[in-house]
Image: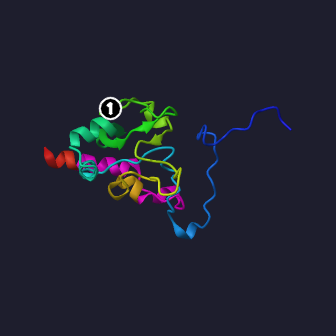
Amino acid sequence: MTDEPARDPDENPYWAEPEPHPDPSLGCIRRGLCCRTSPGWFAPGQAEQAAAALDMTPDDFVRQYLVIDWIDLPEAGRVHVFAPAKLARDGLPLEPCGEAVSSLYSHLKGRCIFYLGEPTTPGSPSGCRIYAARPVECARYDCTHDPALNLSHRAIALQWQQRADADD
C-alpha cells in the first residue's frame, strides 16, 4: 500500500488513462475523450455555420467561443485557423477568446468550450453543444483509427491557405 493519495480522473483529466473502447468496430460512440483534452480545428466556412447553429453573428461567435490557433508550414509559412477554446480546470478559457494563441497553447490540454460533459441528471444536456456543426477535425476523428488516418492539423491548415490564396 502506498501513502500517495488516489487521483480522481475527473479532478485532473491529465492523469487519467483513457478508458478502453468497449467495441472498436462501433467507431465513435461519443464518449468525449477527445473533447476533454483538445478541441478540433474548423475548416474554412465552418465557424460561420456553427455561429448560425447558435443563432449568433460570426464575430460574436469568435469573440465568445473561439481562439485563433496556428501552425507553421514549410511551404506556406504561418497559417491561422479557428478552433474552439480550451477550458482550464476552473472552466475559463486557457487563453482569451477571439485572439491568436501563444506557442504554448498547442501543448496544453483542456476541455473544449462546447463539451457539456456527461449528463448529470436524466435528460440534462451532455456531449457537444454544436455537434451538428462541429469542426471538421472532430467530425473526421475516430479514436479507434491509427492516428495517421485521422485528419491532421497540417491538412486543415492547407485548406485555410488555399482559401487565403483564392481570396488574394
**Is 10 in the magenta?**
no
Q: Position of residue 32 (x, y in %)?
A: 51, 52
Quarter containing the N terminus: top right
Res. 66 visible in picture: no
Q: Which residue is mark 1?
A: 100
Q: Position of residue 98 (x, y in %)?
A: 29, 33
Classify 22 as above or below 59: below
Nearest the viewer among 153 and 138 is 138
Res. 131 visible in picture: yes
Q: Position of residue 58 (x, y in %)?
A: 22, 43
Residue 153 vs residue 161: left or right? right
Residue at point 60%, 42% (across, down): 10
Chief SS of the magenta region: helix
Q: Position of residue 16 (x, y in %)?
A: 63, 44
Task: Count every numbered label the image shows and give the total.
Answer: 1
The residue at the far right in this view is 1
Residue at point 39%, 39% (across, down): 85
User: Where does the magenta region start and end?
Assistant: 140-162
Residue 75 vs residue 26: left or right? left
Q: Secondary structure at mark 1?
A: loop
Nearest the viewer among 109 and 64 is 64
**Is 156 in the magenta?**
yes
Nearest the viewer among 128 and 45 is 128
Residue 1 vs residue 108: left or right? right
- Amino acid of disc 1: Ala
Q: Residues within 10 Å of mark 1 (few under 14, many from 20)?
A: some
